[in-house]
Image: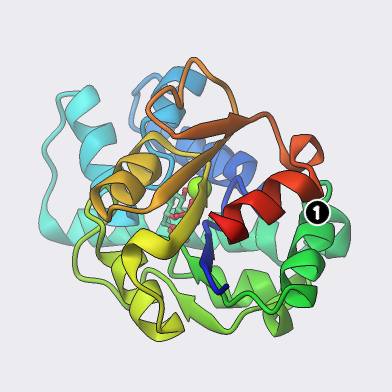
Amino acid sequence: NKKGFIFDLDGVIVDTAKYHFLAWKKLANSLGIDFTEVENEQLKGVSRVRSLEKILSWGNKTISEDKFMELMSAKNTDYLSHISKMDEDEILPDVPKILNLLKDKEQPISLGSASKNARTILERVNLKKHFDAIVDGNDVSKAKPDPEVFLIAAKLLNVKPEHCIVFEDSVAGVEAANAANMVSIGIGSEDVLGHAKYIFKDFTEISNEFINSLIEN
Ligand code: B16
Ligand code: MG
């Protein structure tokens, strides 16, 4: 039995969500726009361009195209300054355990991230070797909640979408997995990810038996 296991990156494998938060907050506040965890939740899994568009609309701001590009680049530079300090300690609990279990069971594994920095981050935390395929923000034309990122991953793994399982921490990502006709597993809080097929607080709550049942069914 072969299934395709697709992992989101930010908020699932590593807690880079906190660095996105810091960088967007700095940028929003510099424009006089409020930015709290509530706004941040709506940016999870959302592309860089779309995130900035949302922040500007919350602040009722319109800016020139040049200024837009400048802000995007400033946000990413700031974000990368956090990323450059990352190491294996920032891998979220039990992620390596699950990746190793899937490898033992000969299950194909892909990354399915909206981030254009995904490969850099996987290299920093030394997890790249675990992935049979990597699909990230550089490979897609339509951002989550569009299912494109996960459908490309399924194709690269050579597994039918309905035989794929997606781990996601974002509202947009769970929507994308559902739209792709995949089994969605929310990693985070039930209040936010109620539309996922299964929800766990983190990987420490996921048992080997549960993974086995996903493979068998
Ligand atoms: P970048 P994921 C997403 O990654 C993040 O959740 C989201 O907050 C971010 O804006 C997006 O990547 C783009 O990231 O600016 O690095 O290209 O959760 O889909 O792995
Ligand atoms: Mg995420």
Does residue 206 show up?
yes
Query: Would you name the residue on which mark 1 appears?
Result: 90
Above or below: residue 59 compared with residue 118: above
Residue at (51, 82) in percent of width and height: 133
Q: How is the image coloured?
A: rainbow
Residue at (37, 28) in percent of width and height: 195
Above or below: residue 178 compared with residue 70: above
Decide if residue 93 is on the left or right side of residue 74: right
Residue 57's x, y, as percent?
17, 30
Q: Quadrant of residue 61?
A: top left
Residue 63's x, y, as percent?
14, 44
Of residues 134 and 2, the one drawn nearer to the viewer in this rendering? 2
Q: Quadrant of the N terminus?
A: bottom right
Residue at (39, 19) in percent of width and height: 34
Whether the residue under disc 1 has CB within 8 Å of ligand 1? no
Q: Residues within 10 Å of mark 1 (few under 14, many from 20)?
A: few
Above or below: residue 170 compared with residue 78: above
Which residue of the protein is positioned furthest toward the right in this rendering? 89
Residue 201's x, y, as percent?
68, 29
Q: Quadrant of residue 28?
A: top left
Residue at (57, 52) in percent of width and height: 10
Residue 171's x, y, as percent?
38, 34
Decide if residue 5 is on the left or right side of residue 156: right
Which element type, helix, strand or loop, lies under badge 1? helix
Above or below: residue 137 compared with residue 199: below
Question: Residue flagged by tag 1: what amino acid is it?
Answer: Glu
Of residues 173 and 30, the one drawn nearer to the viewer in this rendering? 173
Of residues 137 and 210, the one drawn nearer to the viewer in this rendering? 210
Of residues 75 and 135, the one drawn nearer to the viewer in this rendering? 135
Q: Give the mark count.
A: 1
Does residue 73 show up?
no
